[in-house]
Image (spheres, rainbow, N blue to C red):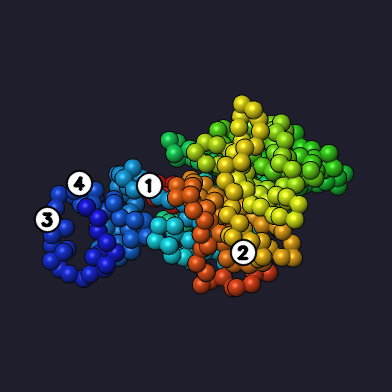
Amino acid sequence: MRITDSEMEQDDPANEDILSKLPEDLTDRILARLPLHSLFRMRTVCKKWSNLMVSSRFIDLYSKTSPQKPWIVLYTSGDLTCAYNCVSRKWHNIPIPTLSPEKCVLAASEGLLCFGNEFFPWPHLFVCNPMTKFWQNLPPMNYIKTIHVVGMVTNPKTKSFRILVSGLFFDEGQNGRLATEVYESTSNSWIIGGTPWPIMAAAWKLGAGYAIWCNGLFYCITFSPFGVIAYDIERRVWSEVQVRMPASVVSPSLLECKGRLLMVGGSEEGVCFAIRIWRLEPKRMAWEEIVRMPPEICKEFVEKLHPSRHFFTFGSAGIVCLTISESTPALMYDFSQKSWQWLPDCPWLPDINNWQLRGISFEPRLHSLV
């Protein structure tokens, strides 16, 4: 049985009487089949249903009954943060606490988002569940003053999370060094994640952007030349992944899909430019092409890239999204449907964006707590 939005919005006493006469367990099972955006509108019907949203019993039932597709979050280095619901195909404005200037989404895991002011000294981070409006201020890091890489992973069993941050600090001699710190939600504290590197020696090791969690390790792209490194959060060590990058790759980004590490990027083939998705084959330690953007869509996408050919890719749970720094249209690939589509324009973002439009995907959850 499925209740539509229009049915939920009807102010009909007869409908309310029918639901009130049903057994509580059956009512919960009916409501647990609502899409998440309808569930939040349902809170306004009565106090009982509003309280249901914070009931651990209902949250557990909902997480098992109605798994959610990822939402696509687009944001700028200013105060604009919007999310696209892939089910309802609608944009939602995400209000966030006014805790620091120039807030950005730095990482995501399941239903949690990590915000921070990555481009400012002494970065300030906080974590929130935008669906439940719960948020937590994180304590200051021990050393890092400018962020380079951020990653996040949650543990549903213990209802805890960890955040990986690598970035710049200056030692007593004012020498720039790169350090790694890990936040543990169970202790609400940061731990040093290994021996800091001299900045020049580490330049080839550490890029910038998201660290992707896959099979117990964080992975991120390095620059000059492009490569992949991994961080073992238990052993607290970085290591180089011995895999050869595709020739002439442009704007490579990593993402995880069903326990496999994927890479999305452009490739130069003479005068032609193609967008490809590769999958890392662990036995051969090689990138295998699995998807290529159709020529007509690729041509339209490349036209929006001028004058540069830089773009940004993110995704999770079978959804891949490509954004262009100075243009608001975003292009999405759905693995389940094997289809490419342009997202509709977001009403809160301008047509031309000079604030480095970026994005991240997260899976909205009621049971993700901070």
Q: Which mark is residue 300?
A: 2
Residue wearing tag 1: 67
Report how far apart the C-alphas of labels 1 and 4 lie in the structure. Answer: 19 Å
Q: Kindly identify which residue carries mark 4.
A: 25
Quote the CA–CA distance across marks 2 and 1: 33 Å
Alpha-carbon neighbours of circle 2 within 10 Å: few (<14), some, or many (≥20)?
A: few
Name the amino acid, label 3. Lys
Residue drawn where x is 71% and y is 31% of the image:
242
At label 4, counting other C-alpha atoms closer than 10 Å, the crowd grade (few under 14, some 14-19, many 20 or more) is: few
Instruction: Label 3: state its secondary structure.
Output: helix
User: Sequence-wise, which precedes: disc 2 or disc 1?
Assistant: 1
Residue 53 locus on image (x, y percent)? 33, 54
In the image, is 89 to the left or to the right of 121?
left
Work out how far the residue at label 3 is from the one at label 1, CA to CA, in angstroms: 28 Å
Q: Label 3: which residue?
A: 21
Q: Is residue 73 left or right of residue 132?
A: right
